[in-house]
Amino acid sequence: KWFGSFPVTQKPEHVIPAFPEPKAQRVEVPDEFAKLRRIDYVWTTPAFYKEGDAELDIIASALGRSGTGRLYKTLVHEKQLAQSVAAYQGSAQYSSTFTVSVMVKSDADLAAVEKIIQDEVAKVVSAPLEQREVNRAITGFESRFVWGLEGLMSRANQLQSYNHFLGNPDSITMDLDRYRKTNLEKIQATAAKYLTPERRVEVLTVPAKK
């Protein structure tokens, strides 16, 4: 009665964009609100739930986890060159970004900070992580996941997320198994494939000059 006169249309074809392959570049961005310098290293990485996505989550934990991450311990605690450190795999539908972000203290040597970042990333490329780092990351992912199921809305959102990305809302075990069933060799191989200097985009945010 109400919609029968609407013309019939064809469902558009689902086009999957090509995986982006950015070349190494560096950009400096002045920010009038910034008080400190921030350096971001970013790499293009696999999409949500694709091969390597979970391994990069684990690498991010090993590098940037507050208190125990390699970069956090060196830059914040030991050398006190940074105000904060973060590392994360920003998973998305067609491709993701792996980011290492460091807020540099005002009196710190930026070149020294960047060398530490580069050296630590090179280490996860050239040698396996320690098993305890992987275990710590898996425990963190599992606990956050369980806590996230406490609310009814968060449960509904999680089911719909699986339905959207995977076509199956019943994917909880599969999701957690991505972390539980990986190994040190696979994690290192993923780092070596994606976290190379040739694929790194660097963004330096600096306080704008008055």
Image (spheres, rainbow, N blue to C red):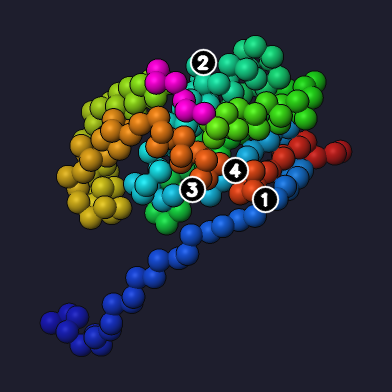
Residue that badge 3 annotates: 45
Give residue 208's position: percent from left, percent from top: 80, 40
Image quadrant for the N terminus?
Answer: bottom left
Q: Residues within 10 Å of mark 4 (few under 14, many from 20)?
A: some
Give residue 136's position: percent from left, percent from top: 38, 20
**In the image, residue 4 lies in the stretch drawn in magenta:** no
What type is the residue that disc 4 sits on? Thr
What type is the residue that disc 2 sits on? Gly
Which residue is outermost to the top?
78
Residue that badge 2 annotates: 67
Give residue 85's position: percent from left, percent from top: 59, 26
Q: Which numbered disc flags the more N-terminal residue, 3 or 1?
A: 1
- Local SS, label 3: strand
What type is the residue that disc 3 sits on? Thr
**In the image, residue 128 lies in the stretch drawn in magenta:** yes
Residue shown at the point (37%, 47%) measured from the top left: 51
Q: Nearer the viewer, residue 135 or 75?
A: 135
In whole angstroms, how far apart are the C-alphas of marks 4 and 2? Answer: 26 Å
In whole angstroms, how far apart are the C-alphas of marks 3 and 1? Answer: 14 Å
Give residue 183's position: percent from left, percent from top: 35, 31
Q: Which numbered disc flags the more N-terminal residue, 4 or 2?
A: 2
Q: Which numbered disc flags the more N-terminal residue, 3 or 2?
A: 3
- Give the magenta part as a residue range: 127-132
Compared to residue 175, the image places residue 24 above or below, namely below
Residue that badge 4 annotates: 196
Residue that badge 1 annotates: 24
- Is residue 205 rendered to the left or right of residue 182? right
In whole angstroms, how far apart are the C-alphas of marks 2 and 1? Answer: 30 Å
Q: Assess whether mark 1 and mark 2 are in contact (beta carbons under 8 angstroms).
A: no
In whole angstroms, how far apart are the C-alphas of marks 4 and 1? Answer: 9 Å
